[in-house]
Image (tube, rainbow, N blue to C red):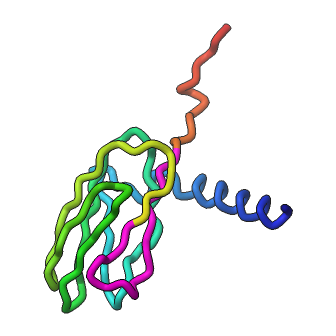
Amino acid sequence: MRYFAVVAALLVFTMAILGDNALGEDGVVDLRYENHRFAPQTITVPTNRPFRIKVINASNETIEFESFKLNRERVIGPGETAIVNVPALSPGRYDFYDDLHQDVPEGVVIAVQPRRNLKDQGNSK
């Protein structure tokens, strides 16, 4: 039980630090495929906001970015880049993988509710 509490606290702390940092101002997240892995393997995005994943295939083989949970798939040739449009997500975890190479570690998109700024909450007096 204590282990779970520590892991949960670390996850919350990491999300608080990352915030929207994974998502650029233009709503695009860069995802690079190289040496049989995606980098970054974890992408954190705010909920209720559509975004795009720019998949850069820096390898010398064709890959297939696929995610059943995101309902997206895209075949990307060696040295090519593809844009994957993703609708606004509910809070949760959405895995993705290379369907052509089963040995590649999965990645995950984590949709989190943005923290509200105290200024935005206003006074309810």
Q: Residue 72: which quarter of the image?
A: bottom left
Q: Observer-nearest residue: 31 or 68?
A: 68
Location of residue 24 in the rendering, given as x and y in whole percent from the top left corner: 34, 55
Q: What range is drawn magenta here?
A: 96-112
Q: Which residue is found at the position 84% from the left and 61% from the top?
A: 1
Q: Observer-nearest residue: 119 or 15?
A: 15
Q: Observer-nearest residue: 14 or 65?
A: 65
In the rendered view of the protein, which quadrant contains the C terminus? Answer: top right
From what the image shows, is residue 123 above or below residue 52?
above
From what the image shows, is residue 125 above or below residue 12?
above
Q: Residue 5: which quarter of the image?
A: bottom right
Q: Let me know if residue 111 is in the magenta part.
A: yes
Q: Let me know if residue 15 is in the magenta part.
A: no
From what the image shows, is residue 6 above or below residue 120?
below
Is residue 79 left or right of 25 when viewed as pictured?
Answer: left
Q: Which residue is found at the position 19% from the left and 62% from the top?
A: 83
